[in-house]
Image (cartoon, coloured by chain):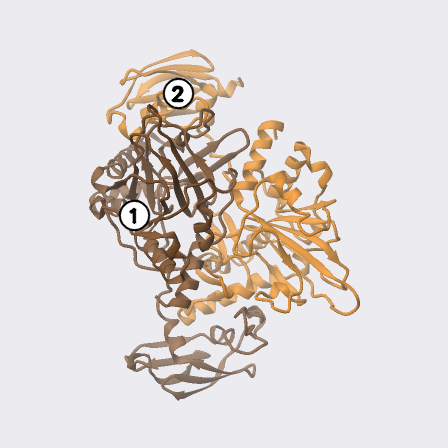
Chain colours: A orange, B brown
């Protein structure tokens, strides 16, 4: 126990428990908040940690009636309903800290083209938990990681994906082709270049992570372009706060349709959380159509969008590399945009990618379980 | 063309196109908004409707330079970049209407226990598109629909689910058991009653629709309880606006963990859209723990939560029925809570349910494609 986490005094206050720590911190815990955490079989299931007691059924006038500091690390508490509980001082203190991320854990390192490239892991090594945790931590930090040694065959990516968890099935199925298709219902399946974009912002709710696997890439061109959407959004916020505001508040319509599918979503290009932090970037020129809004509003929106596009498409913000057969990457689709240079169909070459998706919970769950095992 | 949708005049205004309709409505369309919709091969892909031109690359001073009313249903427009486009008056007028739901389409009918039961469809009939559209429209309206004639065998529900689309795979896989399990990591897998709840609010992002299929239900008890969370939330808003506000603004922590999985999410019990409409209800007493917040805030939260619980658990708000082998239901997990009465393990009975999940886009896509085919 560090000095600052040592309990100094406990007292009854406002029907709750007031605790003072050695560093001067002080907090009064609500009686129901304490009571619904009682480690007894009637209150919490010992194995799952799930709550069996319904907090709403506790007496409305529940109170802490007794509190005794056992030592600097624990306090014994009695309640008006008869419950007697020993609380760990460290756990009480930890409860005061702002909550950790519920999504993938770790500090994000924003980057631009100077980053040059991304960390690369070999599939054979990822069968060990520690390298897999390294990959997921790098994914949390940078939003993109490369994998090599992935068999360049039809469903060769499934072994890698299985190390993380179950794939997301969409209207297209599981792992799907990205190659030239004369019957294309999406511009992805042509040889044209694709501006950086996120995948499927037209889904309610959208794709969490994109995995792209290279089976063949022997045409001239076809390099991958990767952009940190959060870095671009933060740069826009610094350089042109009004444009940032316009993109964070204007709802935009995204749509995909083919013969068997109709997907639509309405969202802002920049999504903020309740604290005003950038939480999501949505950019997909192909599938985006802003609604008819008053001309002055649209004038502001289009100017902001043009400034955003200029930054998103800038070479200085872009990391470019050519994916080789047997390589793959995994991308955070809430943060990172990907695109490709056009490629030439001439000659005897071939370009064949396969792609699969994960939900966000699948990836963050794996990281957190590995952290429990390997620390971090 | 109805009279109100008839174009009366067109004019150049603010670099855009001003249109007046016969009923007096008037709107000035921004030049870029019009230009990026030009039905030409350079601008839009004819087949997919996807945009090939990047709006950000259009001249910043783009203007409508010419506008001519062709007849009451069309206007011919010339742009400063040389594009010449004919716009349909009905489409322009439709663009002014508030956007349709991007999620499942239809007016919600809020209900309480007096509803008595839910529409029921036979699986054999659902292989026709029109009854399947009926089911999806009822799901949009009520949030719960029954299906019968579903083979009471292990993956017997997959045929029904396949009529809608691909199942959602979670950490538990696809279709999973809900039956008593001595090794249970979730209280669902016991014989205790379950208060009404939504499934997996601890996921980032959460389950869209729940399908529960009955293979056996011969124990005493085990009735299903279904509650319209939107009806309860709206009732709370009417009767106790302060409580409603507390539940819409207090972030609450949800968690599920077992040996291989760690899922967590932070969200309010009542989720509102940007217009203040109820968009989601999250209620799962087992897995919810509010963070340590100042006692006065928690006092307000617990009082509101107790009032919400009272309504959610009230018989008057609940539809109760016992699912029979070969029956299933599908639930909107953003809106409808489900639970079950406890059941007795005594005697030679058995209770065996199987459940699967859908993402929201899968269900709404199916409805919209069927509407395209069958109207509605």
Q: Is residue B83 left or right of residue A19?
A: right
Helix or strand or loop: what does disc 2 sit on? Answer: strand
- Residue B230's mark? 1
Q: Name the residue at 49% across, 48% down.
A: B167
Quadrant holding the C terminus of chain B: bottom left
Which image quadrant for residue A310?
Answer: bottom right
Which image quadrant for residue B288?
Answer: top left
The relative height of residue A210 versus residue B313 in the rendered view (above or below) is below
Q: Name the residue at 24% across, 49% down.
A: B111
Chain holding disc 1: B
Is residue B275 visible to us here? no
Picture coordinates of residue A203, whole percent (x, y): 48, 56
Q: Nearer the viewer, residue A43 or A18?
A: A43
- Residue A251's mark? none
Toward the right, the furthest residue is A347
Is residue A139 visible to us here? yes
Quadrant holding the N terminus of chain B: bottom left
Q: Mark 2 points at which residue?
A: A19
Q: How crowded is mark 2: few (under 14 residues within 10 Å), some or many (20 or more)?
A: many
Picture coordinates of residue A155, whole percent (x, y): 66, 49
Q: Which of B248 and B326 is in front in this view?
A: B326
Q: Is residue B50 left or right of residue A327?
A: left
Q: Which of A365 and B65 is in front in this view?
A: A365
Q: In this view, does B256 lie to the left or right of A138?
A: left
Picture coordinates of residue A109, whole percent (x, y): 62, 44
Picture coordinates of residue A241, whole percent (x, y): 50, 57
| Callout 1–callout 2 Cβ contact below 8 Å | no
The relative height of residue A55 versus residue B330 in the rendered view (above or below) is above
């Amino acid at each position: 126990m560090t000095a600052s986490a040592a309990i100094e005094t406990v007292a009854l206050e406002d029907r709750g428990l007031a605790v003072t720590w050695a560093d001067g911190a002080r907090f009064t815990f609500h009686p129901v908040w304490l009571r619904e955490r009682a480690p007894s079989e009637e209150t919490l299931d010992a194995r799952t940690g799930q709550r069996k007691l319904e907090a709403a059924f506790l007496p409305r006038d529940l109170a802490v009636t007794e509190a005794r500091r056992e030592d600097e690390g624990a306090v014994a508490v009695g309640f008006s309903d008869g419950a007697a509980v020993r609380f760990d001082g460290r756990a009480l203190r930890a409860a005061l800290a702002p909550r950790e991320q519920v999504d993938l854990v770790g500090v994000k390192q924003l980057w631009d083209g100077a980053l040059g490239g991304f960390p690369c892991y070999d599939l054979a090594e990822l069968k060990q938990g520690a390298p897999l945790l390294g990959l997921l931590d790098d994914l949390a930090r940078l939003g993109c990681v490369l994998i090599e040694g992935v068999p360049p065959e039809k469903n060769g990516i499934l072994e890698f994906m299985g190390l993380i968890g179950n794939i997301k099935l969409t209207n297209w199925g599981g792992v799907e082709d990205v190659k030239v298709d004369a019957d294309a219902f999406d511009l992805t399946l042509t040889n044209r270049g694709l501006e950086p974009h996120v995948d499927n912002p037209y889904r309610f709710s959208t794709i969490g992570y994109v995995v792209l696997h290279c089976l063949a890439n022997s045409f001239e061109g076809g390099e991958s372009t990767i952009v940190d959407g959060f870095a671009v959004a933060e740069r826009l916020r610094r350089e042109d706060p009004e444009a940032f505001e316009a993109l964070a508040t204007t709802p935009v319509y995204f749509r995909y349709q083919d013969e068997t599918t109709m997907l639509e979503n309405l969202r802002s290009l920049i999504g903020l959380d309740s604290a005003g932090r950038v939480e999501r970037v949505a950019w997909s020129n192909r599938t985006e159509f802003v609604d008819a809004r008053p001309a002055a509003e649209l004038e502001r929106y289009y100017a902001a969008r043009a400034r955003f596009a200029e930054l998103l498409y800038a070479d200085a913000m872009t990391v470019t590399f050519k994916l080789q057969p047997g390589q793959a990457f995994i991308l955070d689709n809430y943060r990172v945009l990907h695109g490709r240079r056009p490629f030439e169909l001439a000659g005897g070459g071939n370009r064949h990618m396969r792609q699969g998706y994960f939900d966000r919970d699948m990836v963050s769950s794996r990281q957190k379980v590995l952290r429990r095992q390997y620390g971090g």
